[in-house]
């Protein structure tokens, strides 16, 4: 069993990005600028956004963090989005999810200009992705593709079972892995909470992507010998032995699953860090006008 080291890969990507920023600077070009909107005080969201901003600093991007009160109105939040849409210095921006219950998340996502939607959540980017057109890919699926690519994991003709059908991970990764080319050309089964005999489905997989949001859900006796396991989960479990009061667990029961795998991503240190790296890659693409032109 070999660990798929998201920390190592994300650092490699950031080193490559930093070199490119140096080159841009030397040529007097525009420095990529990512903005992030965070609403309220969700503890996990604070950690994720801080990591995105820190990554910008590491690679030499400009960043802006816009903090909004938890009770901001829909209208005021839409105004913040519009301001970023119209700010010529901001190449791309994200609105950290989840949003408070009174906010219409779909309306917010639709309000972001597709060419600045570096999270790839806007239906225009999603549709373009599904049709294989140039698009901002959602950061977590893109991070998974980058792991497969950089570890040269064979995907052609493999049976991939995705557990979870969210708009931001399960559904897009199932589309991306079934597309023509590398990494792709998989036969994909998309499973979810209503799937009959989920363990039986997972047992048929050469590649498992666990993205269901339930801690330690996928068990060792569900996994075929030699399978590749990608664990997308980042779950907080109460743990009094920790100073923070919690520990982080994936959607895979690592201890029982790892002995059966050829490759597995650890949590933490796997997909999460690659999500941030992918967001940085998308921000550079936005700055260079690679998807929608300059
Ligand atoms: N919440 C959980 N994952 C993500 C993500 O990739 N982007 C945003 N904006 N919010 C999230």
Image (tube, helix red, strand yellow):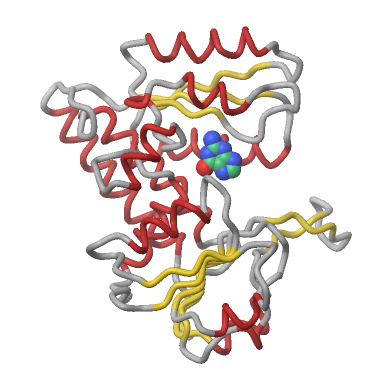
**Residue at image location 70% in from the left, 56% down from the top:** 235
Q: As displayed, is residue 159 above or below residue 62? A: below
Query: Left or right: 289 with respect to 169?
Result: left
Residue 88 image point, x, y percent: 31, 11
Tell me where residue 60 sits by quadrant: top left
* Residue that sits furthest to the right in the current view: 240
Residue 90 image point, x, y percent: 36, 18
Residue 54 image point, x, y percent: 49, 37
Q: Nearer the viewer, residue 106 or 49?
A: 106
Q: Nearer the viewer, residue 12 or 185?
A: 185
- Which quadrant of the rendered structure holds the C terminus? top left
Tell me if I can see residue 51 in this picture. no
Looking at the rendering, the quadrant in which ligand 1 lies is: top right
Query: Left or right: 150 with respect to 80?
Result: left
Query: Left or right: 229 with respect to 14?
Result: right
Q: As displayed, is residue 99 above or below residue 205? A: above
**Residue at image location 69% in from the left, 63% down from the top:** 194
**Residue at image location 66% in from the left, 88% down from the top:** 221
Q: As displayed, is residue 284 above or below residue 226? A: above
Residue 293 image point, x, y percent: 18, 26
């Amino acid at each position: 069993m070999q660990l798929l080291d998201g920390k190592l890969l994300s650092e490699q990507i950031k080193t490559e990005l930093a070199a490119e920023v140096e080159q841009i600077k030397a040529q007097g070009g525009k420095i990529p600028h990512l903005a992030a909107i965070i609403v309220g005080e969700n503890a996990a969201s604070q950690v994720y956004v801080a990591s995105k901003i820190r990554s910008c600093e590491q690679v030499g991007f400009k960043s802006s963090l816009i903090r909004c009160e938890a009770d901001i109105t829909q209208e005021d939040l839409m105004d913040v989005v519009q301001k970023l849409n119209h700010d010529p210095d901001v190449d791309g921006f994200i609105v950290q999810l989840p949003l408070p219950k009174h906010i219409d998340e779909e309306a917010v996502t639709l309000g972001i200009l597709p060419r600045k939607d570096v999270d790839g959540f806007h239906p225009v980017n999603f549709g373009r992705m599904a049709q294989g057109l140039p698009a901002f890919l959602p950061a977590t699926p893109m991070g998974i593709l980058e792991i497969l690519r950089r570890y040269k994991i064979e995907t052609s003709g493999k049976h991939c079972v995705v557990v979870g059908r969210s708009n931001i991970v399960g559904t897009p990764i199932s589309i991306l892995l079934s597309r023509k080319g590398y990494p792709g050309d998989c036969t994909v089964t998309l499973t979810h909470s209503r799937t009959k005999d989920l363990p039986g489905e997972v047992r048929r997989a050469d590649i498992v992507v666990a993205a269901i949001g339930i801690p330690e859900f996928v068990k060792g006796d569900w996994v075929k010998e030699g399978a590749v396991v990608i664990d997308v989960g980042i779950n907080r479990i109460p743990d009094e032995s920790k100073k923070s009061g919690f520990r982080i667990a994936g959607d895979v029961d690592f201890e029982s699953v790892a002995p059966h795998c050829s490759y597995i991503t650890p949590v933490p240190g796997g997909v999460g860090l690659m999500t941030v790296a992918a967001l940085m890659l998308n921000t550079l693409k936005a700055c260079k006008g690679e998807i929608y032109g300059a």
